Image: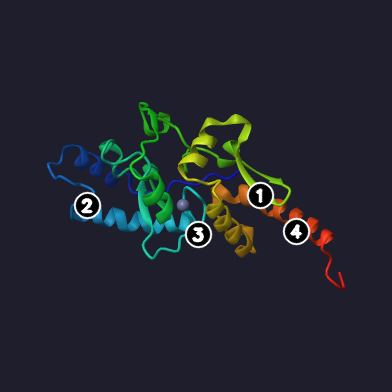
Amino acid sequence: MKKLKVPAYNWRVVKELKRYALTTKAKDPWGHGKKSSKDFKREMTGLMLVEQSKRCGYCGCRLFEKRPHRDHIAPKEDYQQWMFWPENLVLTCFTCNTDLKKSFDPVVTVGHTYRLTEFSFVHPYLDTPADHIVFTSAGLDLIIQEKDGSLKGKKTIEIFDLASVERSKQRAKDIMHDEDVEHLHGNYRDLLESAIEALQAKLVTVKARFPRAGD
Ligand SMILES: [Zn+2]
């Protein structure tokens, strides 16, 4: 299973920006017009668009927004030390970021390093979605569920409303749209491949039940 890779960014600049976020008197260091932070935001967005294959880092759906949202996985207001930390940034769709996650804090315990920090939902860079979420086909429905009782899987489905009719429809549309799974968002590729398999099995069942003339 391929994990989403953290875009490589100049380490020296990241450390400098971290120091700035922790020591500045500016009320909003993220929005503040400092040149190195502007460059960082612009360049990181470009790198993430490529790494995420223009898909939302949370729900895996296509990013149609002209300017996708940059979400701070651990909210920047509560974790200033990770405000400019590449592993804490992900591009997301409007629904996931603004409608659903909002200011939700997924941090359970803060570790000595970012990677040792415990998160309550599937972290786009640190976790493998297929370990926590699974698609199953029940009759004509394609169901998304937590895998083996995974609490992270459960939380992810709950926070991002992944089991709702609307989001399931969006996912199905996306799947049908993707003819070549090679281009799928890395983290979700296996999940979507299994969804395609389930959908194809479903289509076979439907066809068998309602054969068209000539089939
Ligand atoms: Zn999303």
Task: Look at label 1 and name its amino acid.
Answer: Leu
Residue at mark 3 to residue at mark 2: CA–CA distance = 26 Å
Q: Position of residue 177 (x, y in %)?
A: 60, 64
Q: How many marks?
A: 4
- Mark 1 — residue? 142
Name the secondary structure under disc 4. helix
Disc 4 residue crowd, few under 14, some 14–19, many 20+, Cα 10 Å: few
Judged by depth in the image, the label closer to the viewer, 3 or 4, is: 4
Judged by depth in the image, the label closer to the viewer, 1 or 2, is: 1
Task: Look at label 2 and name its amino acid.
Answer: Gly
Residue 141, placed above or below residue 115: below
Q: Position of residue 166 (x, y in %)?
A: 53, 54
Residue found 61% across the figure and 57% down from its top: 172
Residue 65, placed above or below residue 56: below
Name which quarter of the figure residue 176 lies in.
bottom right
What label does residue 209 carry, if any? none
Residue at mark 1 to residue at mark 4: CA–CA distance = 12 Å
Residue at mark 3 to residue at mark 1: CA–CA distance = 19 Å
What label does residue 31 carry, if any? 2
What label does residue 203 carry, if any? 4
Judged by depth in the image, the label closer to the viewer, 2 or 4, is: 4
Residue found 30% across the figure and 54% down from its top: 41
Decide which of tag 3 and tag 4 comes sooner along the chain.
Answer: 3
Decide which of tag 1 and tag 4 comes sooner along the chain.
Answer: 1
- Mark 3 — residue? 62
Disc 3 residue crowd, few under 14, some 14–19, many 20+, Cα 10 Å: some
Residue at mark 3 to residue at mark 4: CA–CA distance = 23 Å
Name the secondary structure under disc 2. loop
CB under 8 Å between callouts 3 and 2?
A: no
Residue nearest the viewer, comparing 45 with 65: 65
